């Protein structure tokens, strides 16, 4: 699958230049945001190194991963601040065929995936597309990126290979992998919608040769059906970058259909420090999953 994103360094330079001009009135917040960006760049490099470290490991006498190992891993992930952990095999349809922010692992992605999610705080995202929302997005990219690198280290210490893929970008598309791992369902806005945080989270991944994986199953949340009756994000997107999937599906090399036109999204994403309007306007963000589904059930009963 072709990557929709270009070089990380160029994007960050453009972002910093624009931000410096625009944020004279939010100096403190802007300074936090720049700290997050510096941390992101550093951890993206650590994550890329994890691929090489993993390749160098001698795994000739390695045993199978036990239930105890997976439970300990989940506990460790939580201790690193990771909110959601799911397991699934890597689907090659979701691997990018182009270089992705410097990862060159298209044929070497390990078979099993641990998909990770971290919440973006509601108070901040509610201010999208203003700076506090962008700062929160960058904070979570930075926090989750650091935690992802550490989790991969932890797995390697247990004797298994582990590649860290940073939330800012990696060689695999995260939302469909997270859906496959049962963490939630993808909405029309292309974002994973979860029971716990609605769409207000960021995703990353660790791939490993540890096996067998714990069982996982689809979340079965009914998000896609609800989206058909909603469409708020389609209307409110400032870049007109979101389509109803049956109206204009965008095929990535014929392998995966998406409803987001990244070329239209990115200018707004960078101009507004992370945009996030499609998260803020989503009913699953505003009211939460349980309330939305309870309301939808009442409507169906009344019809
Ligand atoms: S981040 Fe903004 S521009 Fe991009 S899809 Fe969402 S609402 Fe549209
Ligand atoms: S705003 Fe509406 S259509 Fe868009 S993802 Fe959320 S529920 Fe689906």
Image (tube, rainbow, N blue to C red):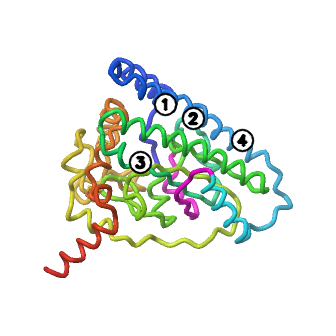
Q: Nearer the viewer, mark 4 or mark 3?
A: 3
Residue 113 locus on image (x, y percent):
59, 58
x 81%, y 56%: residue? 59
Checking the image for residue 183, the label placed there is: none
Query: What is the magenta range?
Result: 80-97
C-alpha gap between disc 2 and disc 1: 8 Å
Please tell me whether mark 4 sits on a helix, a strand or a loop: helix
C-alpha gap between disc 2 and disc 3: 29 Å
Residue 73: quarter of image: bottom right
Residue 70 locus on image (x, y percent):
67, 65
Q: Are marks 4 and 1 in contact (CB under 8 Å)?
A: no
x 43%, y 62%: residue? 196
Q: Along the polypeptide, which appears first: circle 4 or circle 3?
A: 4
- Residue located beneath label 1 in the image: 7
Q: Are marks 2 and 3 in contact (CB under 8 Å)?
A: no
Q: Do the residues labelled 1 and 3 touch (CB within 8 Å)?
A: no
C-alpha gap between disc 4 and disc 2: 13 Å
Q: Along the polypeptide, which appears first: circle 4 or circle 2?
A: 4
- Residue located beneath label 4 in the image: 52
- Residue located beneath label 3 in the image: 121
Q: Camera-side residue: 100 or 155? A: 155
Ligand 1 contact, mark 4 (Cβ < 8 Å): no
Q: Along the polypeptide, which appears first: circle 2 or circle 1?
A: 1
- Residue located beneath label 2 in the image: 102
């Amino acid at each position: 699958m072709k990557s929709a994103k270009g070089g990380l360094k160029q994007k960050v330079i453009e972002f910093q230049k624009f931000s410096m001009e625009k944020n004279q009135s939010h100096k403190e917040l802007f300074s936090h945001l720049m700290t997050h960006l510096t941390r992101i760049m550093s951890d993206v490099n650590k994550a890329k190194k994890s691929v090489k470290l993993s390749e160098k490991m001698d795994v000739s006498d390695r045993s199978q991963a036990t239930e105890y190992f997976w439970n300990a891993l989940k506990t460790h992930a939580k201790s690193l601040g990771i909110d959601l952990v799911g397991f699934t095999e890597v689907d090659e349809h979701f691997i990018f065929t182009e270089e992705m922010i410097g990862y060159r692992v298209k044929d070497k992605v390990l078979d099993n995936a641990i998909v990770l999610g971290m919440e973006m705080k509601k108070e901040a995202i509610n201010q999208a597309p203003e700076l506090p929302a962008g700062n929160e997005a960058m904070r979570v990219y930075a926090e989750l990126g650091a935690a992802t690198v550490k989790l991969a280290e932890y797995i390697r210490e247990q004797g298994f290979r582990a590649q860290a893929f940073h939330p800012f970008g990696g060689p695999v598309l995260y939302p469909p992998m997270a859906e496959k791992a049962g963490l939630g369902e993808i909405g029309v806005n292309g974002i994973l919608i979860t029971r716990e945080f609605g769409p207000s989270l960021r995703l990353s991944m660790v791939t490993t040769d540890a096996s067998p994986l714990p069982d996982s199953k689809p979340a079965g949340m009914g998000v896609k059906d609800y989206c058909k009756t909603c469409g708020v994000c389609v209307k409110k997107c400032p870049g007109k970058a979101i389509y109803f999937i049956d109206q204009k599906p965008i095929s990535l090399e014929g392998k995966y259909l998406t409803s987001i036109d990244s070329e239209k999204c990115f200018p707004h994403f960078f101009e507004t420090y992370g945009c996030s309007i499609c998260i803020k306007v989503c009913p699953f963000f505003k009211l939460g999953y349980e309330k939305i589904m309870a309301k939808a059930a009442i409507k169906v009963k009344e019809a």
